Amino acid sequence: GAVVSQHPSWVICKSGTSVKIECRSLDFQATTMFWYRQFPKQSLMLMATSNEGSKATYEQGVEKDKFLINHASLTLSTLTVTSAHPEDSSFYICSARDWRDPDTQYFGPGTRLTVL
Amino acid sequence: SQQGEEDPQALSIQEGENATMNCSYKTSINNLQWYRQNSGRGLVHLILIRSNEREKHSGRLRVTLDTSKKSSSLLITASRAADTASYFCATVSNSGYALNFGKGTSLLVTP
């Protein structure tokens, strides 16, 4: 089956630093990738939709300059949390859509970000 | 924005029993999907049901969809301890592929 990886799986950083999270589709080409955020015991909230070779589309309330998304290739999208603050601490999950099966999204294992 | 609302929020049953979770949504959909999430992990896709379908089966899973009531249910039969997880419904609109997740049901299956 289709596999999506995320790196790192967890990261602890100091307030004010930037953190980059990678999302890779390992065995398929993903024309579209999605980034979600999940707070403890809550559901997933869509942050942005990332299309290969074009700018990401952000959901209302998500700061573009704070959460930089780059989808440079058909197998890699990155999310950079700039000038991270403790309120950015969360579980970040990406998903990828295989163009051959557009209705199904394959999720990465998530990245736990803790900002001190 | 979140569209789905699951109930119950939490469900505790014994192994062998059936577990039923419900999901309601607000706007028109192209399809509705159910996912499972083990604690602190990513999501696993369980089943997809399209707006023109009323029922779908996959192993011990049975999903129904009632578009007139904007609701869906997920039935897990003969539950196992390994089914313990959070279950989310997610809808896909006709205008895109983004998933709108419900709040989820936390299922605990005790041996």
Image (spheres, rainbow, N blue to C red):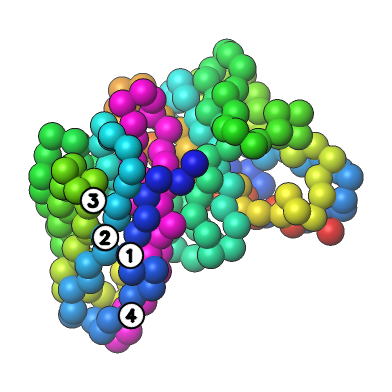
A112 or A1, which is in the foreground?
Answer: A112
Residue drawn where x is 72% and y is 54% of the image: A89
Quick one: label 2 or label 3, which is nearer the N terminus? 2
What distance separates the C-alpha of mark 3 from that of mark 1? 11 Å
Residue type highlighted by circle 4 = Ser
What distance separates the C-alpha of mark 2 from that of mark 4? 15 Å
Tell me which chain the residue with mark 2 is part of: B
Residue type highlighted by circle 1 = Asp
Name the secondary structure under disc 3. Answer: strand
Crowding near the residue tagged with mark 1, few <14, some 14–19, many ≥20 C-alpha atoms within 10 Å: some
Magenta span:
B84-111
Residue, disc 4? B12
What distance separates the C-alpha of mark 3 from that of mark 4? 22 Å
Crowding near the residue tagged with mark 3, few <14, some 14–19, many ≥20 C-alpha atoms within 10 Å: some
Residue, disc 3? B71
Q: Are marks 2 and 4 on the same chain?
A: yes
Quick one: label 2 or label 1, which is nearer the N terminus? 1
Identify the disc placed on residue B7.
1
What distance separates the C-alpha of mark 2 from that of mark 3? 7 Å
Tell me which chain the residue with mark 4 is part of: B
Residue B109 in picture, x, y percent from top left = 32, 78
- Residues marked 2 and 3 touching at CB (< 8 Å): yes
Question: From where the camera sits, is residue B74 visible?
Answer: yes
Residue B68 in picture, x, y percent from top left = 16, 43
Q: Are marks 4 and 1 on the same chain?
A: yes
Identify the disc placed on residue B22.
2
Dominant SS type (magenta): strand
Question: From where the camera sits, is residue B45 visible?
Answer: no
What distance separates the C-alpha of mark 2 from that of mark 1? 5 Å
